[in-house]
Image: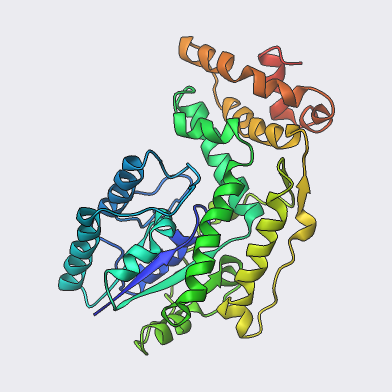
Amino acid sequence: MAGLIVAGFHRSGTSSVTQALAKCGIQAGDELMDGNEFNQHGHFEDWPVVRFHDSVLERCGLDWATPLEAPIELTDQEAGWIEAYIREREAKEDLWALKDPRICRFVEHWRSSADNVRFLIVYRNPIESVHSLNRRENINIVRSLGKDRRAQYFLDKPDLALRLWIEHNAALLKFARVHARECIVIGHHHYLAGFDVFSAISDLLGGRRISAPEAGTIDERAISKKHPHLYVNDADLIPDALDIWRSLQQIDVACAEGALGMDISSSLHHDPTGEISSAFLASYQVSELHKITELNEENAKLIKDTKSIIKKISEFPFSIYFKNKDKYAKVMQRYDLE
């Protein structure tokens, strides 16, 4: 009996990898989170585990979008929950998988609860992960009519997604270095390029043969939004992100077998005023507002709540770009933002 925990930051490709494992017959749980437009084929997260992690974070006065100031300590009851969950999975399945981005904060706890659990660490470059997370959360602001408190974090703090990327991946990097024999690390860009991660997983699991699924598991819509640059308000975050990125590539199983690394140093830029990064966040909201065809009282309130941030993109120098895009220009004109 063995378990494989897929660990990676939000929007890092862990869903597509875990879906591929499911197609190989390695199930991720009995109560899986449904898919949506951000993960068309499903998130492959077991709801009991998600609820457990959220409850621990809530006890600590945190949530998944709150940066940690110190490692989380579990109560005896919480540690017992993990042990019971593992026993239940082992009783039903000879080989099982588990995925939840929150697990990045709990990897040591899960490891200490069973000797036969192995870890597949998936990482994605910060430019793509951060833009993807920011886009999702700012769309959620619009759809919740400004009531999604957690999503509002990402609008109020433009560097938040990058801070979380650094925290989560730093924890995974430390874990991989300490427990090198119990985990493998793979960049999602190598997975997309066709690297045979399943052979590496077979070796990790002691030679159990796992073959790549015949059908693809990549949600093209989830990876189609490409951004060549990331603008960062706090300059100190840039070297931290680069150091973690380079260090992960050094222990990447694909790089160890000859795959080329990726240099992202020219893609991270200091934005001292924060205006460029704020304008990017506003653009996601404007794109979603563009889909609204009729104004009602709730929509009018939403527009009022978000008008200050959206107004940024109608001002120089951002207007040079946004006013040349028809959908943005129409929204600005509609809401008297020109």
Q: How many marks?
A: 0
User: In the figure, 217 relative to 65: above or below?
Assistant: below
Q: Position of residue 293 (x, y in %)?
A: 55, 20
Task: Answer with left or right where residue 321 lies relative to residue 55.
Answer: right
Task: Answer with left or right where residue 336 lies relative to residue 212.
Answer: right
Say which quadrant the C terminus sits in: top right
At 61% from the left and 48% from the top, the residue drawn is: 162
User: As drawn, which residue projects farthest toward the bottom?
Assistant: 207
Between 86 and 67, the residue placed more toward the observer is 67
Between 183 and 315, the residue placed more toward the observer is 183
At 71% from the left and 53% from the top, the residue drawn is: 238
Task: Answer with left or right where residue 246 lies relative to residue 192.
Answer: right
User: As drawn, which residue projects farthest toward the top?
Assistant: 297
Between 17 and 53, the residue placed more toward the observer is 53
Q: Position of residue 327 (x, y in %)?
A: 69, 29
At 59% from the left and 32% from the top, the residue drawn is: 155
Between 273 and 215, the residue placed more toward the observer is 273
Say which quadrant the N terminus sits in: bottom left
Colour option used: rainbow
User: In the figure, 44 relative to 314: above or below?
Assistant: below
Which image quadrant is residue 160 in? Answer: top right
Q: Is residue 146 visible?
A: yes
Q: Is residue 329 visible?
A: no
Task: Answer with left or right where residue 309 lies relative to residue 314.
Answer: left
At 84% from the left and 25% from the top, the residue drawn is: 316
Q: Position of residue 289 (x, y in %)?
A: 58, 25
Q: Position of residue 134 (x, y in %)?
A: 58, 41
